[in-house]
Image: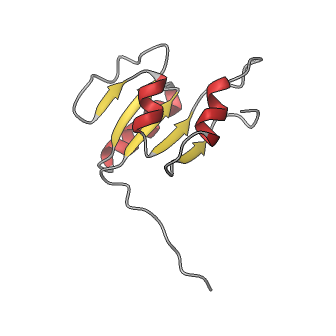
Amino acid sequence: MGKETGIEIKGKTLGIIGCGRIGKEVACLALGMGMFVIAFDPYKNDFFTPSENFQYAGMKDLLEKSDIISLHIPALKMEYPWLQNLLFGNEERTYIINTARGEL
């Protein structure tokens, strides 16, 4: 049996793309585990106020600063050109969590 490995998430930065109902819950969980949260959403949720552990940011800042990125966006009849850069343009290791739709 192989050795199980993981990463310490306390102190890491979670980027949330889409901070609706599910994204908000993920942000609350992450904040509770000692993570920093950066969120991108065209419609800012009044539930959150900027603090030292939570901020809304533009897509570029989110992609540059996040250790882990969680996708919570709908699969629309449009392309996401930034998704290719997200998956293939980052030289450092970033974990991608797609809890959105398979079409992404």
Q: How many marks?
A: 0
Q: Residue at x 57, y 32 (%)?
A: 72
Q: Residue at x 27, y 22 (%)?
A: 49
**Residue ranking furthest to the top:** 43
Image coordinates of residue 40 in percent, x first then y, are 46, 24
- 103 sits to left or right of 37: right
- 17 sits to left or right of 56: right
Classify residue 39 by image quadrant. top left
Relative height, residue 75 to residue 100 (above, below): above
Relative height, residue 13 to residue 20 (above, below): below
Q: Quadrant where the C terminus lies? A: top right
**Colour scheme used in the picture?**
secondary structure
Query: Depth check: 19 or 17 in front?
Result: 17
Q: Residue at x 34, y 22 (%)?
A: 47
Q: Residue at x 33, y 46 (%)?
A: 35
Image coordinates of residue 73 in percent, x first then y, are 61, 27
Image coordinates of residue 36 in percent, x first then y, are 32, 41
Image coordinates of residue 68 in percent, x first then y, are 47, 45
